Amino acid sequence: MFASSMDWVNDLSATLAVSQLFLLGSFFLVHHSRRFLSLLMVVFSGCLCAYLLLVMSVSFPPLVTFALLLLAIATPAVLWLIANELFLDSGKSHPLALGLMAFYMLLRGGGTLLYSSDMAQANLWFLAVFVLPQLIMLGFAIHSVYIAFIGRSDDLVEERRRIRVPFIIGMGTLIAVILGNGFFLYPGPLADQLNFLSFSGLPDFMISLYTFLITFLFNLTIFRLHGDAFELIVERSEQTARKLQTVPQAKRTDPKLVERVLLTMETDRYYAKTGLTFGDLAGAVSIQEHHLRRIINKQMHYRNFNQFLNHFRIQDACERLKTTDESIANIAMDVGYASLSSFNKAFKEIHGIPPRAYRSLAQAGVSPLSAQVSRENR
């Protein structure tokens, strides 16, 4: 009787969570389906729905159960892709990370089919098909929180800043659930083959209620943002820093403030100050940080402070690469970078080629920009 009532509570809480996830997925599918981040949100909603269906007291055919399992175990990977796409404004997902996702999916999914319940849980097979994928999934989840955390101070997109802390808190709690409960527990026709996952932990209805709560709060945030939600899902190609000259004077609602910011950056090469922070710039311009953040984001079209800072530093470095034989390391340090590696990375993100190649082209009379466009059109 007690077990039956608990099943009812769990099914109800899981159904509520699924309804919120359906709303979330539908919003991104209907309004922004052509955006990669939107598609990731739709997939993420589907992955969580798959997990919730697996913990409900509903029996599915073995093939359906296995399909839901594959979706469920993909959740940490999709979460990482979302964090990477949402909170990082440059670069692409590293091929090694994508390979690691495929590796743990293959181990967990394939191992699920081949695992036999009479195998000792201490043997290498159990470690390979359960423990190792579990650790990889946990690593992706933790790194997702890390990505959201590290960029908050330099984030210039106010709409995105609002969801960073809720994302960190929500996903941090989810990680605690992962540690205490295992990531996916489910009954069903494959239970005999998968019973090594069925260790005790938090009741399923608590996980379902938590999923419902964070999804409900996230939906409220999205609906409150309305049109501003678009700022959260623009493509990476649209997020890259634009030249300040491309912002017409007529579109600068506070041209005097914009000029003040530019003057401050260029006077005495203020941008070359090593370790320069957004707070330092706000103090130098004598303006509140939230106001300065809006000016640089909305009027100059930069999404984070590093993009804005790199514009000045790389522009200075380019002139010196063209006209001098000074060592690249000296140039990097003199324009404000703490290391040569960070300079090379920033330079390549903007120009598509390393500084040494840029210098060779420029001094040979070949426009580096033309060479870059030629490579992209091949």
Image: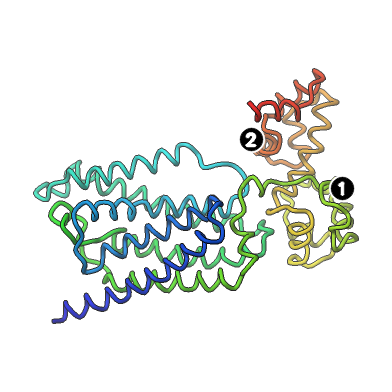
Residue at the far top: name it: 364
**In the rendering, which numbered label is found on residue 341?**
2
Observer-side mark, 1 or 2, equals: 1
In-front residue for pair 180/239: 239
Crowding near the residue tagged with mark 2, few <14, some 14–19, many ≥20 C-alpha atoms within 10 Å = few
Say whether marks 1 and 2 touch (CB < 8 Å).
no
Question: In the rendering, at what x and y percent does residue 88 appear?
Answer: 59, 50
Q: Compared with residue 266, is residue 348 higher up or lower down, i.e. above or below?
A: above
| Residue at 83%, 49% in the rendered image | 270
Please state, as top left, top right, bottom left or bottom right, where the C terminus lies in the image. Answer: top right
Q: Position of residue 11 (x, y in %)?
A: 27, 73
**How far apart, in angstroms, are the residues tagged by discs 1 and 2?**
24 Å
Which image quadrant is residue 52 in?
Answer: bottom left
Q: Residue at x 21, y 69 (%)?
A: 57
> How far across and how far down the image is residue 32, in percent?
56, 57
Residue in front for this viewpoint, 64 or 287: 64
Q: Is residue 358 above or below residue 235?
A: above
Residue at 76% x, 44% y: name it: 311
Q: In this orientation, which residue lies closer to the viewer: 14 or 22?
A: 22
Query: The residue tagged with tag 1: helix, strand or loop?
Result: helix
Q: Amino acid at mark 1?
A: Glu
Type of amino acid at the residue the image marks with label 2? Ser
Question: Which residue has dot 1 on it?
Answer: 266
Q: Residue furthest front?
A: 30
Which of the two residues, 8 or 158, is positioned nearer the viewer here?
A: 8
Q: Residue at x 77, y 41 (%)?
A: 313
Helix, strand or loop at disc 2?
helix
Q: Is residue 85 left or right of residue 69?
A: right
